Image (tube, grey):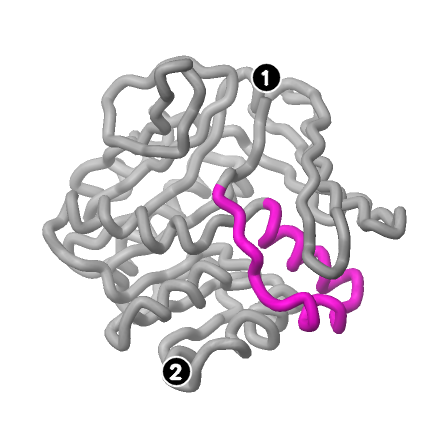
Amino acid sequence: MFVPLLHCELPHSLLTMMKMNLAQQKHFFYELSVQSPRWQVDYLPQFHRFLTGKTAYRFREDFCGTGKISCEWVKQSKRHFATGLDLDSPVLQYANSVNKKILTPDEKKRVQFLKQNVLKTTREKFDMIGAFNFSYFIFHERKELLNYARAVHASLSKKGTLFLEIAGGSGFLKSLTEKKTFKVPGFGKVEQIWEQHQFDPITALNDYSIHFKLPNGKWLNDAFTYHWRIWNIREVREILEEAGFKKTVVLWEQSDENGKLNGEYLPTDQGENFTSWLGYIVAVK
């Protein structure tokens, strides 16, 4: 059984959300039900420091969407800078008008959102680049993912790191529908429906959808849809090495004494074959 992420946070005030139209509200619900920006900002840079001996200050969020992670990044100190890249103009507008808007004046100066293809090398060099929520699965061909890896490698500073979030297991491939409910204070209970469609074992392609049911019974059907190539860890690591990265490390989610995944990640060379799993591939320049 698959749940996108477990560490969910309330992104911003109810008042802000109530002023949004439905097209904007879907991003609010996505942040609340799927993303974990505070966790990623607190936790993942520790592995960057472990692998490189250096602190990451300049961060690039690829396929940044609403830019929530970038906005959390710059809250850490006056030395932290973030850049978010995406090609979707409406979601970049949301990033600027909602998430960046609530930052302090100094924090706003240290975060920027650019409409730019991640396949293009950036002039600025970054300590750490991240592609989360399996966003790079939009690359269906090996040459496309290799081009992305090479562009990232060229955009990183010396000893820079790339973090790729990855998911898999038989539970991630089978057709199913999962529901979970989260409460928005002052608004009511919102139901999120995660739908997995029919996986094609020949092309390794699958379709996924997120729907929301609002307290008034109104539906946001196909609020988000994805047509993904389901990459496996070994082939991604081989592509990263071909792109010039010095080494790659897999961060694998650990299980508790009852065999249940506990949200803690450690470097490992072997993983238990859970029905559904989440992990990170870290590449070091």
The segment highlighted magenta reads 7-33
Q: Amino acid at mark 2?
A: Lys
Q: Is residue 111 left or right of residue 9?
A: left
Farthest residue toward the front? 186
Q: Amino acid at mark 1?
A: Pro
Which dot marks residue 201?
A: 1
Q: Kindly identify the residue that appears in the image at 32 percent across and 33 percent down.
A: 265
Work out whether mark 1 precedes mark 2 in sequence or the reverse, and give the earlier one: 2
Q: Is residue 114 above or below residue 207?
A: below
Q: Determine whether the residue tagged by mark 1 lies in a helix, strand or loop.
A: loop
Do tag 1 and tag 2 residues touch (Cβ < 8 Å)? no
The question of residue 8 being in magenta is answered with yes
Q: Nearer the viewer, residue 16 or 22?
A: 16
Which dot marks residue 282?
A: none
Q: CA distance from mark 1 to mark 2?
A: 47 Å
Farthest residue toward the left? 53
Q: Nearer the viewer, residue 45 or 131?
A: 45
Q: Kindly identify the residue that appears in the image at 43 percent across and 24 percent down.
A: 261
Q: Residues within 10 Å of mark 1 (few under 14, many from 20)?
A: few
Q: Kindly identify the residue that appears in the image at 24 percent across and 22 percent down.
A: 269
Q: Is residue 177 left or right of residue 279?
A: right
Q: Kindly identify the residue that appears in the image at 22 percent across and 49 percent down.
A: 48
